[in-house]
Image: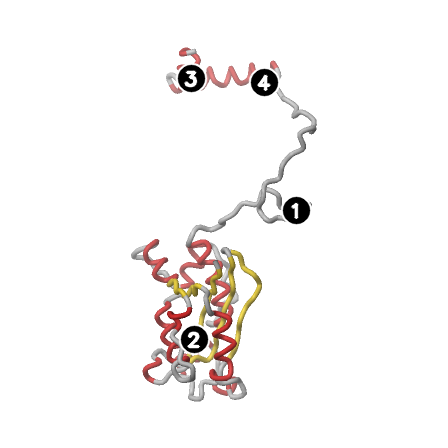
Amino acid sequence: MRQIVLDTETTGLDPAEGHRIIEIGCVEMVERQLTGRNYHVYVNPEREVEAEAITIHGITNEFLVDKPKFSAVADEFFEFIKGAELVIHNAAFDIGFMDSEFGRIKPVRKTADHCGVVDSLALARAKHPGQKNNLNALCKRYGVDNSNRELHGALLDAEILAEVYLLLTGGQTALSLDAGSENGGGSGGIRRVSSDRPELAIVKATEAENKAHQAFMTALEKKAGGTVWSKLEGAE
């Protein structure tokens, strides 16, 4: 399965009020493994960024002046996410802005018609009801390092969310038994041992070790008033 962990930054809170996307960050995962393929772009929103929004993400109007408009990046962005399952924290927010942006250009595209959507905030609320489930709270809960997150940033937040999402939905999903072997290459297959290998050595306890163990068990039984081990030995 191909998944894209996605985040956006915007000029404000509501696309219905004319607010626009100013940054898009995407991180690709295939079969729950990060591939190293990312998509990141800043966008000229063709309007002012609200002061309150700047305090959150730090992206200024001056910085965005020479950035491409959404219409110039729409096709490459769409091709990157098309057919994937999008993992988004508070998905309704980002999808609302994406659909608003795609609705301004031809052909008009609706995200849900081309992508699956998973809301990691809804998953977190179901798993941790009554607790804080914003990204910072989840990082603290799952031990994810977010020390670089002084301000919101779409790509940084997508990278952090990818790690949080994997832990939230089950953590490690595969155990490689042949990592580093010549044949396995760390891909998670079975490493077979040669049939003519030397027999494994059988190491038995010495007489002194047996006596020390018996003395410990006798003292333990006396202190506990009987043990499971003594009852099993009696049954034999």
Label 1 or label 2, whichever lies nearer to me, is 1
Which residue is at 41% across, 59% downward? 138
Label 3 or label 2, whichever lies nearer to me, is 2
What is the number of the mark on residue 209? 4
Q: Determine whether label 1 and label 2 are within 8 Å by CB.
A: no
First in sequence, mark 1 or 2: give its number: 2
First in sequence, mark 3 or 1: give its number: 1
Could you classify mark 1 by the number of other residues whose Cα lies within 10 Å: few (under 14), some (14-19), or many (20 or more)? few
What is the number of the mark on residue 97? none
Q: Amino acid at mark 2?
A: Ile
Residue marked by disc 3: 221
Residue marked by disc 1: 180
What is the number of the mark on residue 56? 2
Question: Which SS class for mark 3?
Answer: helix
First in sequence, mark 4 or 2: give its number: 2
Question: Which SS class for mark 4?
Answer: helix
